Amino acid sequence: MREAISAATKEAMKARDAERTGALRMISAAIKDLDIASRTTGSGTATDDELKTLFAKMIKQRQEAAAIYEQNARPELAAKERAEIATIQEFLPAQMDDAAVAAAIDAAIAETGAASIKDMGKVMGVLKGKYAGQMDFSSANGVVKAKLAG
């Protein structure tokens, strides 16, 4: 994943695409920060799963910022945030569709033996472990809650 980001950065620089270069450099900086944090915990560099989680977090931050910009009549800034989201998503695996998410949730509920809302943390933990970067966990949270509530 790191090599792909590095190659994409070089291509964007050669193409003189300032916005894409900026977004890719931001991604690289976030990865370096995560690597530094990982070194302090003794695990070395961040794993691909940790990078997927980081990218999902970055996308969520940009979605929230874009929504705020839209509310405050700043469409040019919202468009910039959406362009960054698109750049980050290039390095994530394809997102699961609704049917696949529902099947994954059913499997996680069966795997954990969850029976009530109290078991929601277990189910979400399994989902985050298996589907980091492939699933929108904020929407999956509501589906899990509905299924466990009965």
Image (cartoon, grey):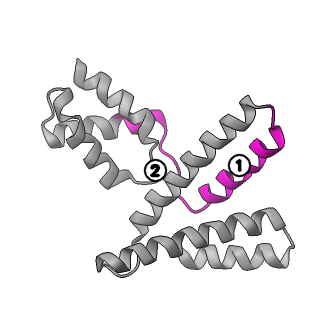
Q: Earlier in the sequence, mark 1 or mark 2?
A: 1
Instruction: Name the residue type under label 1.
Output: Glu
Q: Residue furthest top?
A: 150
Tell whether position 9 is magenta: no
Q: Nearer the viewer, mark 1 or mark 2?
A: 1
Residue 8 percent location from the top left of the image: 69, 73
Residue 141 percent location from the top left of the image: 36, 34
The residue at the point 60 percent across, 75 percent down is: 4
Is most of the magenta stretch helix, strand or loop? helix
Q: Closest to the observer: 82 or 96? A: 82
Quarter of the figure with residue 118: top left
Residue 133 in the figure: left or right of residue 77:
left
In the rendering, which numbered label is found on residue 46? Answer: none
Quarter of the figure with residue 44: bottom left
In the rendering, which numbered label is found on residue 81? Answer: 1
The residue at the point 39 percent across, 72 percent down is: 47
Q: Closest to the observer: 108 or 119? A: 119
Which residues are the magenta region? 73-102
Label 1 secondary element: helix
The residue at the point 71 percent across, 75 percent down is: 9
Tell whether position 84 is magenta: yes
Residue 90 lies, with reference to residue 41, above or below; the image says above
Residue 82 in the figure: left or right of residue 124:
right
The residue at the point 50 percent across, 72 percent down is: 33
Instruction: Name the residue type under label 2.
Output: Gln
